[in-house]
Image (cartoon, rainbow, N blue to C red):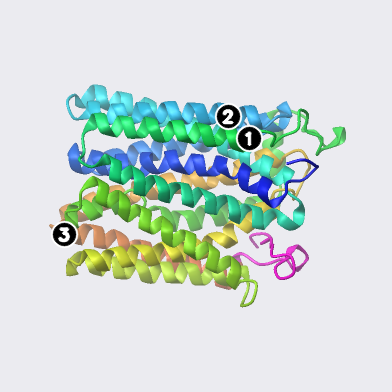
Amino acid sequence: MNGSTLSWPGIARLGLVQAAIGMVVVLMTSTLNRVMTVEVGLAATVPGLLVGLHFAVQALRPRMGHGSDAGGRRTPWIAGGMLLLVLASVGASAATALLATDRVAGLLAAVAAFALIGVGIAASSTPFLALLAERVAPERRSGAAAMTWILMIVGIIATAGVGGALLDPFSYPRLVAVTAGVGAVALLLTAVGLAGAEPARRTAAAPAESPQGSFREAFREVWGEDEARRFAVFIFVSMLAYSAQDLILEPFAGAVFGLTPGESTQVAGMQHGGVLLGMVAGALGARRWGTLSGWAAWGCAASAAAFLVLAATAFAGSADAMRAAVFVLGAANGAFAVGAIGAMMGLMHAGAAGREGLRMGFWGAAQALAYGMGGFAGAAGSDVARWALGSPAAGYAAVFGVEAALFLAAAAMVARGGARVRAADVHWGRDGAAALAAAR
């Protein structure tokens, strides 16, 4: 990792931090959600609110990014945020166990734990992305973004597979122990990834480029950047379309198909495996066919089709067909993600210098708020639809149908030019990197 920019091996090592974040978060948003809904017997709205809370707290992302801008160091924020995330995740697992015997105390503990999870994610991931943009050469930024997200997906897949196997036969002490073990591995990966990743003093920005003024002044400056603001809207809409399934997929597998907690966690792992395949296919395919915005549009359209098939499996009763639809859904999401990741990296340095962390926090907050709103809407919508339609299968199918419609709307927005490739920023082909420019 010597020199002003990172080599590809250096980028991969720094990407271990992103993998560590994914490892912890997948247990919080998928496994605990399923346990609360199926084993504890809570309405899906309750874990939906808890996960929505941790996303709402991530509105702190711009402030965290600004803090790392002003302080001149990213790694202390990343390391501290990861430690808080791991401790809070263990607390959330313990709170879930407490819910089985004491609803009030367990719920209070869960609220505190999920709020701290949101703080930990905001404090770690936002400075991480800013550090990545600073240490990566412009022609490698999109490739670096894709690599780090693929590593995150690999971490999620590994956790879903291994963690799912370790959870069976299920017990609450086993749940807490598995969470603690995953957290310990995540902290180790973070330490390896951050070692030598940032100079003792950051020298990427000249003194004139250093952030000046209060957070409010800095935020107003970024908000005034047309490209940054429009891209935030694009992120919000697209992530809202994706996120409604996030909290109901594992409960759907358990309630409709009778899968165990370990088996439903492995279904989530299949989805993330599809995302990995879709990202690789989109990255390689965009070098030869079409544009990144075109791949994003087709990814949204394919996601809509996969949701319609997934809704049909609820009535067909075929677990194998459900698994196949989940895998295809993941692949379609991955193709779409290539465009979104390239956009963030391409716009990181757009606008005033010294605001990279705040700018990434701005977009991260838009993404988090969309995830929180979509996740809660999906969970609450499944409860309402199950009550109104009289069966779990019909309730989940109704939510999947709404998600299909949202993805079609997102595809239409991209096709109309909601995201375009700026020719000056595209480097696909010879060097294998690309940058998707701005929301129009």
Residue 440, image quadrant:
bottom right
Q: Nearer the viewer, mark 1 or mark 3?
A: 1
What's the amino acid at mark 3?
Leu
From the image, tell me which residue sits under label 2: 79
What's the amino acid at mark 2?
Ala
**How dense is the environment of label 2, judged by Cα within 10 Å: few (below 14), some, or many (20 and up)?**
many
**Of helix, strand and loop, which one carries label 3?**
helix
> Left or right: where does residue 195 sit relative to residue 115?
right
- The label shown at residue 194 is 1
**How dense is the environment of label 1, judged by Cα within 10 Å: few (below 14), some, or many (20 and up)?**
many
From the image, tell me which residue sits under label 3: 389
Residue 252, image quadrant:
bottom left
Magenta residues, start to end = 418-440
Residue 291 painted magenta: no
- Residue 380 location, x and y as percent? 28, 47
Residue that protrudes farthest toward the bottom in the picture = 289
Which mark is first along the chain, 1 or 2? 2
Residue at (38, 25) in percent of width and height:
112
**How dense is the environment of label 3, judged by Cα within 10 Å: few (below 14), some, or many (20 and up)?**
few
